[in-house]
Amino acid sequence: MAHIELNNDLPGIRGLMYYSPETAAPMNALAELLLRDDDNTLTRGERELIGTYVSYLNDCFFCQNVHGAVAGHYLGCSMDQVDAIKNDFTSANLSSKIKALLVIAGSVQKGGKHVTPEQVEAAKNEGATDKEIHDTVLIAASFCMFNRYVDGLGTWAPQDRSFYINRAPQRAEEGYIGSILK
Amino acid sequence: MAHINVPEGVPGIRSLVMFRPETGKPLYELAQVLLRGESTLTPAERELIAAYVSYRNNCTFCYSSHAAAARCLYEGDAGIVDEVLKDMQQAPVSNKLKALLNIAGKVQILGTEVTQADIDAARELGATDRELHDTVLIAASFSMFNRYVDGLASLTPTEPEAYAEMGVRMAKGYTLPPQPQQ
């Protein structure tokens, strides 16, 4: 049970967003732009993977499973493969560029000042653009918000991971705007 | 120097949202609704929560600017702000606000750090569910803003006068800065 009375039974951030639609609107707009907007040279799968990885580091069960399942949907890999990437992305079958960006995301999760010029340089050397570095930092930072929101208010999360896997294709199709009740 | 090519001479988050106004828009909307929207917490109290979290995240730009905004909003009681940053428990603020700041401090560490006892303590001192929700989300959002600002190494002014000016502007509310002249 959540720490506050939400007057609904929706899981995770959806219960919070139903409770507080005025803050939900900019948060969903941000998620939509960062994760789904097609005017982006990072694929949707790569961006969802960054969100998943940061949620995993923040130990947020709901977010890492929602976004892990969506990442798997886009990348064509199973939840087990997504778990393997979370555990050790360096040995995963991913591009050197996304690996360098995941290093930056991992630093952001610890704190903004953990990102070093060397990490940024390494990403640029693998072909990352300024916009890709910007978006990586902001995706990682935004998940440090979403994760804290979800867990800081003690929301409930379905424990059966097939719940997340089954919903992923619909989430990928319909996006985050107006996603609370769907 | 910032990690990416943002407008020169523009400090902090303003330089980042000028670089990427698409994501800047929901970020500023979120700040506006959380810090200036309808609430039983005063704008001064909410700015204080923002400054407190930013101080704990060691984000000089965010804590200096939001402390300046809080000083403006507290008017004659501006000294409260620095007392809270120095030693929250000993500061001359209500026990309810201390209980909310305690929760904000837990959220700054991680969402799962917030306990039912923290929530109950704030509730016994008169905090409503809405105030608890807003406190958690303000703290969570500054865990994002701080990482965004420092993760991209945006310009951080060192002179106090720069922040005093920002505080006056911020006290009036949050609107996306105009694009720099080309």
Image (tube, coloured by chain):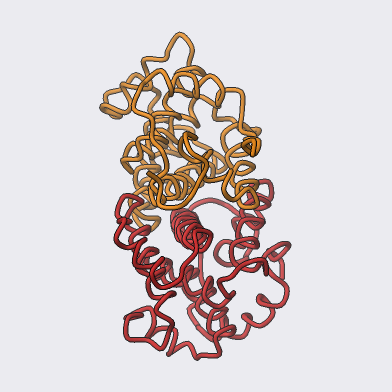
Residue A125 placement (x, y as % from top left): 38, 69
The residue under the point 59% across, 46% down is B27
Left or right, A154 with reference to A115: right
Left or right, B181 with reference to A60: right
Residue A94 placement (x, y as % from top left): 43, 84
For the question of whether residue B129 can be seen, the reply is: yes
* Image quarter (top left, top right, bottom left or bottom right) of the C terminus of chain A: bottom right
The residue under the point 47% across, 87% down is A79
Chain in red?
A
Relative to B16, residue A180 above or below: below
Relative to B84, residue A38 above or below: below
Residue B39 placement (x, y as % from top left): 61, 33
Residue A159 placement (x, y as % from top left): 48, 78
Relative to A91, residue B9 above or below: above
For the question of whether residue A1 can be seen, the reply is: no
The residue under the point 58% across, 75% down is A43
Name which quarter of the figure residue B100 lies in. Answer: top left
Q: Residue furthest top?
A: B76
The residue under the point 26% across, 26% down is B86
What color does chain B have in the rendering? Answer: orange
Which of the pair A161/A123 is nearer the observer? A123
